[in-house]
Amino acid sequence: MPRIGPAPYTDRMMSRTWHSLVAGMALVVTLPLVAACNSSGTGPSEASSSPANSGTSSPITLEVNQSRDQYGKQAILLQLTNTTDSPVTVTGARLHSALFQGDISWEPSGGSLELPPRQPKSLPAALPAAACKTTDKASPEPNARINYSASDKSPVEESASASDPFGVLPRNADELCIAAEAAAVASLALDPGLEVAADGGTAVVRLVIKPATPGNHPESFTIESFEETTLLAQSPAAPWPQNVTVGSAPQELPLTIRPARCDPHAVAEDKVGTLLPLRVGVGDRKGLLKIAAPNELRGRIYDFVTAACAPAG
């Protein structure tokens, strides 16, 4: 009597099924390996082209900073960090920001600079002219390009991660724009002479203001106040003027100064003590306008502070 229903698997049938399954799995595993060897004949090492061409980022990061040495010199620091475990050789760095008319560039004086693994190096770079007519005040983060070579590889230029965590670029761009707009109205400079009081405790320095175009014209700005420095302070008996209008008339503003500090390192370690900050309002801008003492006056101020701080007798 014929059997009704599906026939049971025989040992031979089970063996054929198992071999088919294994063959199929082998084919699936083999396909990716075949795909890796493409029709052009390039292997994996040849297919991984230079990062400069593939658009990947550099292993070097860039952070913007500014020390007291750069303050007042229209310069900043580009801090480069090698994020790898091997040294890299850097031959140039460029930082682009919409706040400036050109790139901020650095090139090593010796042709190249070695960055040790996982260590930063701070490199000074001069600032170009600010883009004062930029309408977008909330500018995007800067972007950088680094020229470097790693190990025995050929030199490449790549985009690098860039950041400005302390707002150095906006602050400097704003100060440069304030200085440019103020200079269009008048020039401001500290006279090289210094009038020391008879008791030696105070002295008078003069701020000389000369109109850019003498005569009657509508341009003007306001010196809202003078700020003290790390080395110089105002005298309580003769406070510095406030809300001075600068316009078409020449002026000389006498500023009575006294030492702001008398510790032994006040003069020896000074960096910005003779850089006088003026808080001004120019057009729609408000901020600091920094007036540097000329070399002759700087020396006289150092002598004055040293003598005023000397112990009596």
Image (cartoon, rainbow, N blue to C red):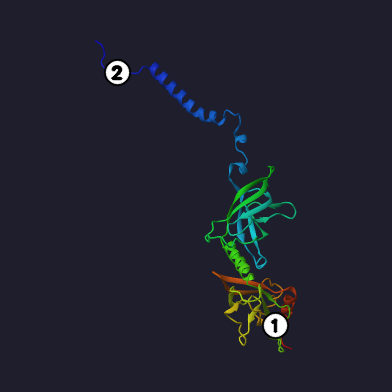
- Classify the position of the N terminus by image quarter: top left
Q: Is residue 310 visible?
A: no
* 3D distance between C-alphas at marks 1 and 2: 111 Å
Q: Residue at x 71, y 53 (%)?
A: 113
Estimate the x, y position of residue 28 in percent, counting from the top left: 48, 28
Residue sitting nearer the eye, 101 or 264: 101
Viewer-nearest of labels 1 and 2?
A: 1
- Classify the position of the C terminus by image quarter: bottom right
**Mark 1, residue position:** 309
Quarter of the figure with residue 219: bottom right
> Image height check: is 226 above or below 237?
above
Q: Residue at x 60, y 32 (%)?
A: 43
**What amino acid does circle 1 point to?**
Cys
Check contact, mark 1 vs mark 2: CB within 8 A. Answer: no
Q: Is residue 130 visible?
A: yes
Determine which of the numbered discs, if any, sits on residue 132 in the image.
none
Estimate the x, y position of residue 302 in percent, counting from the top left: 72, 77
Quarter of the figure with residue 21: top left
